[in-house]
Image (cartoon, rainbow, N blue to C red):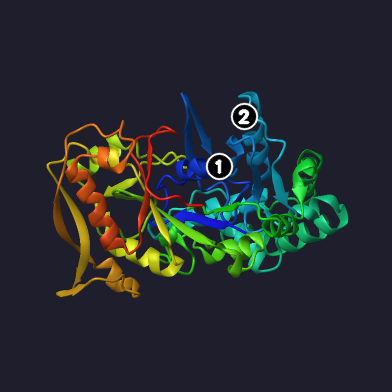
């Protein structure tokens, strides 16, 4: 009954797609359990690059069944467009399963997201404007639209009316916007029903039966630990739980069925959007990391903020997720630096702390305390084993492993599917 959770151990964008794809040939199911099309994965297969936004990375492995779980919020137009794009490139998408309990991102959710973010001005969160937060808010407020509602026009109409009752008041009286017509929304949503029907399933039943039959199931988180609604740098977070516990609620499996939890770490640190970032670099080094690492959001298209590796947040991710392994990505990007700083602790108002402060105020004032590690200049992209790496690169990996609190079991040394060093098996 091997069930693995694979998630980002920083602020997202760590290269989860590469890690998931590496495991894709060995697993039977790959499951997205939270988030929506505000998360992106880039997967390189041979000379082909695939940018996935909503679909699980396992969709690129023919023997794997990709699953969108009940904890995901789904924009039907984005999902169908992504499926169509892959079909045009010869990828078989027919095995996809979509939970009937997943919530739908409606046109009014997208509208509310955009107008609210503009209204906040300088206090904006930095959302992607794709309606993710408002959809999760509707879910919690019990006025959400689920995939299964597309197949009962009466229920769908009642739910849209209930949701727009309040939202139209807000749009007109606070945001000075035109009210949204119920029948127009219902008509658009019903138009997706037949196209989505072949994929809709009771995914909770499917996944639990698969685990009972000793199938290998991989649960794939979007975003990252520090963007978790409960455990991230609130309020600069996403609206769901990318941490390991989210896999249980977002896919409908019990915690006793999880056997390994793998955290993806970038060899340096990046984040997209607003919020505190202690190791952020606003100099030539930051620009070099951005340029060499190709640090532009797959989904947002925004440049990522870049900084040195932060061992404090890595330790925090190990703790809140119960990580058993790390997958270290983009080690090759650091080639060429004479010395590489690593943040081992913070200084806050004259105090040195080695763990992530729970106080938002303290984290905003945290200054990184760096340890300098020797760099390397050799090309590492052809390395196949750990000993193929230059000694300084090996020492860098060992230092990060010791500081982070879990073994590094795989290392990405280039963007390609085969440019990975496997140290320990995840299965």
* Mark 1 secondary-structure assignment: helix
24 vs 359, left or right, is right
* Mark 2 secondary-structure assignment: helix
Q: Where is the N terminus found, in terms of image quarters?
A: bottom right
Nearest to the eye among marks 1 and 2: give it: 1
Badge 2: residue crowd in 10 Å (few <14, some 14–19, many ≥20): few
Residue behind mark 1? 24
Q: Is residue 209 visible?
A: yes
The reply to whether discs 1 and 2 touch (Cβ–Cβ < 8 Å) is no
> Percent from the top left, x then y, of residue 63?
64, 38
> Percent from the top left, x then y, of residue 180?
70, 51
Q: Nearer the viewer, residue 179 or 97?
A: 97
Q: Nearer the viewer, residue 170 or 246?
A: 246
332 vs 61, left or right, is left
Q: Residue at x 44, y 67 (%)?
A: 322
Residue 10, by quadrant, is bottom left
Among the two numbered marks 1 and 2 on one chain, the one whose residue lies closer to the N terminus: 1
> Percent from the top left, x then y, of residue 415?
39, 34
Q: Residue at x 21, y 66 (%)?
A: 345
Badge 1: residue crowd in 10 Å (few <14, some 14–19, many ≥20): many
Residue behind mark 2? 85
Q: Is residue 173 visible?
A: no
Q: Residue at x 33, y 42 (%)?
A: 330
**Which label belongs to residue 39?**
none
Q: Residue at x 30, y 48 (%)?
A: 267
């Amino acid at each position: 009954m091997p069930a693995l959770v694979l998630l980002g151990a920083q602020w997202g964008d760590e290269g989860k797609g590469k890690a998931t794809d590496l495991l894709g040939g060995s697993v039977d199911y790959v499951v997205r359990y939270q988030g929506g099309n505000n998360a992106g994965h880039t997967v390189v297969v041979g000379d082909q690059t695939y940018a996935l936004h909503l679909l699980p990375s396992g969709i690129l492995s023919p023997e794997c069944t990709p699953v969108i779980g009940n904890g995901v919020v789904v924009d039907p137009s984005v999902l169908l467009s992504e499926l169509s794009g892959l079909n045009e490139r010869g990828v078989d998408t027919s095995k996809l399963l979509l939970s009937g309990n997943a919530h739908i991102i409606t046109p009014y959710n997208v509208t509310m997201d955009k107008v609210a973010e503009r209204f906040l001005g300088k206090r904006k969160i930095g959302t992607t404007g794709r309606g993710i937060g408002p959809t999760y808010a509707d879910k919690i407020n019990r006025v959400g639209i689920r995939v299964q509602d597309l197949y009962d026009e009466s229920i769908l109409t009642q739910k849209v009316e209930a949701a727009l009752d309040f939202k139209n008041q807000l749009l007109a009286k606070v945001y000075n916007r035109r009210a949204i017509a119920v029948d127009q929304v219902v008509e658009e949503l019903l138009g997706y029903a037949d196209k989505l029907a072949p994929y809709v399933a009771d995914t909770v039943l499917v996944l639990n039966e698969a685990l009972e039959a000793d199938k290998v199931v991989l649960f794939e988180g979007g975003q990252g630990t520090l963007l978790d609604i409960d455990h991230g740098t609130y309020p600069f977070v996403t609206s769901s739980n990318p941490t390991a516990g989210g896999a249980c609620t977002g896919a409908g499996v019990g915690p006793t069925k999880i056997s390994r939890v793998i955290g993806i770490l970038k060899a340096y640190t990046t984040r997209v959007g607003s919020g505190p970032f202690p190791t952020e670099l606003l100099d030539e080094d930051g620009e070099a990391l951005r340029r060499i690492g190709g640090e532009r959001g797959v989904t947002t298209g925004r440049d990522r903020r870049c900084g040195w590796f932060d061992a404090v947040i890595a330790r925090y991710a190990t703790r809140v997720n119960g990580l058993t392994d790390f997958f270290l990505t983009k080690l090759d990007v650091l080639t060429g630096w004479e010395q590489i700083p690593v943040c081992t602790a913070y200084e806050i108002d004259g105090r040195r702390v080695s763990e992530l402060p729970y106080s938002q105020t303290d984290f905003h004032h945290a200054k990184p305390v760096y340890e300098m590690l020797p760099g390397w200049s050799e090309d590492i992209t052809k390395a196949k084993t750990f000993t193929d790496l230059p000694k300084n690169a090996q020492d860098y990996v060992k230092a990060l492993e010791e500081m982070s609190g879990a073994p590094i079991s795989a290392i990405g040394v280039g963007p390609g599917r085969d440019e990975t060093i496997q140290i320990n098996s995840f299965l």
